[in-house]
Amino acid sequence: MHPAIIFSMIGVLLQGCASVPSQDMLQLTAQKLIGKSQADLLQCAGQPISQSSYEHAKVLRYYKEASIFEESWPCSKGSFPGDHHGCWARVLIEKDQVVGIEFQAVPEAADRHCSECKDIFQACSP
């Protein structure tokens, strides 16, 4: 994989969640994963939704959706639907090690829902 592509992928790390507390939380999550082997990542995070291979790198894509209860607001005789939201995480693997992570909230303006981003790799924290 061309170094410019790798740096551009790494350059957009953690842009999905814009608020400062959420950003700090995601940076801590990313820092804990950098350097882990692909096998360790698969063991704690499970199989990705998709995997793309390039010359010397792989990109694993994970998605975590908010629970149905977070997407609706209760009222007296039912509920109102809320915004559907979740988080994509892309993990860059080189030489069998995690070298970069990018989070993207869905929809992009849903920065208040970054808990899904952190939850993708919750089992990877000691």
Image (cartoon, rainbow, N blue to C red):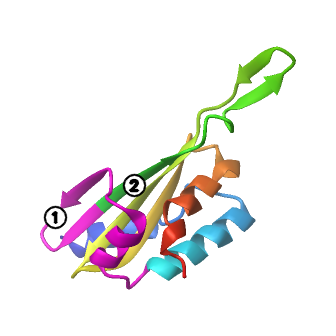
Q: Secondary structure at mark 1?
A: loop
Q: Secondary structure at mark 2?
A: strand
Residue ranking furthest to the right: 76
State the extent of the magenta-drawn residues as a range.
34-59
75 displayed left or right of 21: right
Instruction: Give the residue displayed 71% in from the left and 59% down from the top.
Output: 19
Q: Position of residue 114 (x, y in %)?
A: 63, 55
Q: CA distance from mark 1 to mark 2?
A: 18 Å
Quarter residue 84 falls in: top right
Quadrant containing the N terminus is: bottom left
Q: From the image, tell me which residue sits under label 1.
A: 54
Instruction: Give the residue displayed 58% in from the left and 53% down from the top.
Output: 116
Q: Nearer the viewer, residue 99 or 45?
A: 45
Tag shown at residue 62: 2
Q: Residues within 10 Å of mark 2 (few under 14, many from 20)?
A: many
Quadrant containing the C terminus is: bottom right
Q: Position of residue 32 (x, y in %)?
A: 51, 81
Instruction: Give the residue displayed 65% in from the left and 70% down from the top.
Output: 25
Q: Position of residue 105 (x, y in %)?
A: 55, 49
80 displayed left or right of 40: right
